[in-house]
Image (cartoon, rainbow, N blue to C red):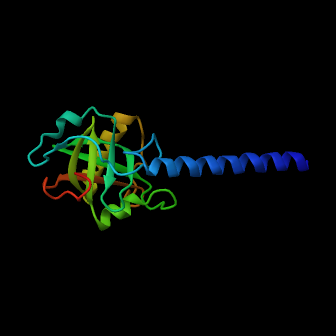
Amino acid sequence: MKSILRGAGYVLLALVVVGIAVSTFARFQDGPVGAVAGGALTSGDWVETAGLDWSFAADVDTIEFQLLAPPRSRTVWIVYHDNSLFIPCALPNFTLWKQWPHEALADGRAIIRIDGKRYAVNLVKTEDPGHLGAVLDLVGKKYGSTGPDDQDLSNLVWAFRLVPRPADDRTPGLV
């Protein structure tokens, strides 16, 4: 029995070491590494977002996105609705693994990368329940996910609208 517990302990220790190594490695990369948060989005041409028709991204499944503070990137779902792009966020208050929604509320300046091109945007949380419902319906259709019906979704799901940010409002070092 002791040898089984010892073996399980070694396996657990190895998994923790590998997890820390992958996470540390990813923080120095240009963008996320799969589902692991990565470093700042430093490559790709900049595209002006003012007046941009976002419909080109309607069929894009995932994008890379980074808040300016802290400069960590992640891969997220994206939906196109009402001439805007939205990033849905399930369980935003589960801060054990998901801190970016609250960081976005404090400072919504962000960079997104779609097909290798970078766009300067602001993330603005959608507060209107009807609008949130429409966005979540699109998430369900696009990704085959279902959410709770007839509930107050404000603590379960958030959606952030991507609002254009001037091209000259880029953080030095990220241009």
Q: Residue at x 20, y 51 (%)?
A: 120
Outermost residue toward the top?
A: 59
Q: Which residue is depicted at the point 83% across and 50% down?
A: 6
Q: Is residue 57 visible?
A: yes
Residue 87: horizontal and vertical position, in percent? 31, 48
Judge whether residue 126 can be spotted in this image. no
| Residue 104 in the image: above or below residue 113 | below
Q: Residue at x 84, y 49 (%)?
A: 5
In this rendering, the answer to whether 113 lies above or below 89 is above
At horizontal 59% and vertical 48% (from top left) the residue drawn is 19
Left or right of residue 168, residue 19 in this image: right
**Which of the 4 image quarters holds residue 172?**
bottom left
Q: Quadrant of residue 59?
A: top left
Between 31 and 51, the residue placed more toward the observer is 31
Residue at the extreme bottom:
106
Instruction: Give x and y (percent) for residue 1.
Output: 91, 47
User: Residue 27: x, y in percent?
Assistant: 45, 51
Which residue occupies the extreme front position in the image? 173
